[in-house]
Structures are given as structure tokens and as C-alpha cells.
Image (spheres, rainbow, N blue to C red):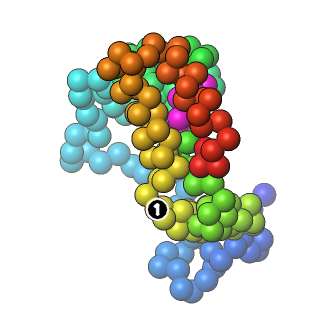
Amino acid sequence: MGDLNEIKRKRKIGNLDSPKNPFDYYDREYGTVPRDTKRAPFQWVSEVAYKNVHRIVSRGYDTTELMEEGYGVVDMLFVDYQARIPTIEEDKMLNYVMIMALEDGLSMPAVLSRIVAKSKTFLTQACGTSILAFGHAYGAYSAFGNRLEKYLNRIDNGECSLETGAALLVKENLNDEAL
């Protein structure tokens, strides 16, 4: 079959053969690096998780096994804070909140990062462009959070019940362009 590095060199993947790169990607070694016996293997332990050579365990759940079963990053965040797997409803709500926190709408930086991510570029280039999306410090989520806090304060002060507060939030903000 031939040397894998030579095959990739002939295929000319992106700009990996550019002399401007500080590292020759085609002449790198494949396989594992020999174990360094002069120091202890990388491992750590905390109140909620531990990591060793074989696994990362958070709140008693092996993260690799969870990922193989189809759980994602949002599920792992929930496990870290609640020490259990989220229900379907909790997962959907947390996904919604994460989207609200990270979605920047149709601002120019967000559009640029989407365009770059959809084109035939390397992930690092899309990530570099996405830094532009940091623009106004996650404005979409802060607007939603401030609005939600207003109604939660009304509920806490006894002005209305939880159901009434939720209904008011939806009724008064249903057609708001900011949401």
C-alpha cells in the first residue's frame, strides 16, 4: 500500500505542504509515543471526578462509555452538576438554554463563522473566524436571562404563581424580535 505520509503528500491535502508551516506534517511519526518512565502517568482526582490512563470518570459515570452510548457534552454538563443522567425533558431544556447562550443570531460575525464552517476549509480556520462571533458578549442569552429574571423575581415576591408568571412571560414577549 505504501507509506501513508507519501500517499498524503501526493494527494496535496490543503496547505499542509506549505513552507510557512512550522512543522512538517508529512514526516511526523504515527503510532503511540513510548511511555515516559521518569515520571508518574498523567492522572488526577477531584471531589467529583478522576482521570487516569484508562478513563475519565465524572460523578461515577465513565465519560467514554456515555459518549459511545450517544450522550453529548450537554449531558455531561448535567451529570457534573446533578450527579445523574438528565431526563429527556431536562436534556431538551438544557440544549435550548445552551443554544440561547451561544447563538448570536444573524449578526455579521455569526454569518462569517457559518460561511467558513460550511466551506472546504480546515477546522482551525473556522474556529479562527468564529472568534469574531464573540462580538457583543453573548447578547442574545443575556437579554433572555434578564427578561426571565424579571418574571422570576415577581414569582419570588409573591406577585403571581409560577404558572401565571410563565404565562405572562410568553404573553408579553411572544412577538418580541429580540427573542
User: Quick check: 16 left or right of 148?
Assistant: right
Using the rendered view, name the quadrant where residue 88 is placed: top right
Residue 44 at x, y = what percent?
26, 34
For the record, the magenta segment spans 92-98
Q: Nearer the viewer, residue 149 or 120?
A: 149
Look at the picture and state if 22 lies above or below 141. Answer: below
Residue 36 at x, y = what percent?
29, 48
Using the rendered view, name the quadrant where residue 69 is placed: top right
Q: Residue at x 42, y 41 (%)?
A: 146
Amino acid type, label 1: His
Look at the picture and state if 109 lies above or below 76. Answer: below
Look at the picture and state if 64 lies above or below 120. Answer: above
Residue 146 magenta: no
Position of the C terminus, as image quadrant, is top right
Q: Residue furthest front?
A: 159
Residue 43 at x, y = what percent?
28, 35
Q: Which residue is the site of mark 1?
A: 136
Q: Residue at x 62, y 63 (%)?
A: 107
User: Quick check: 34 left or right of 17?
Assistant: left
Q: Nearer the viewer, residue 105 or 50?
A: 105
Q: Residue furthest bottom?
A: 19
Res 68 visible:
no
Residue 94 magenta: yes
Q: Main secondary structure of the magenta part?
A: helix
Res 127 visible:
yes
Using the rendered view, name the quadrant where residue 53 is placed: top left
User: Quick check: 119 left or right of 28?
Assistant: right
Q: Residues within 10 Å of mark 1 (few under 14, many from 20)?
A: few
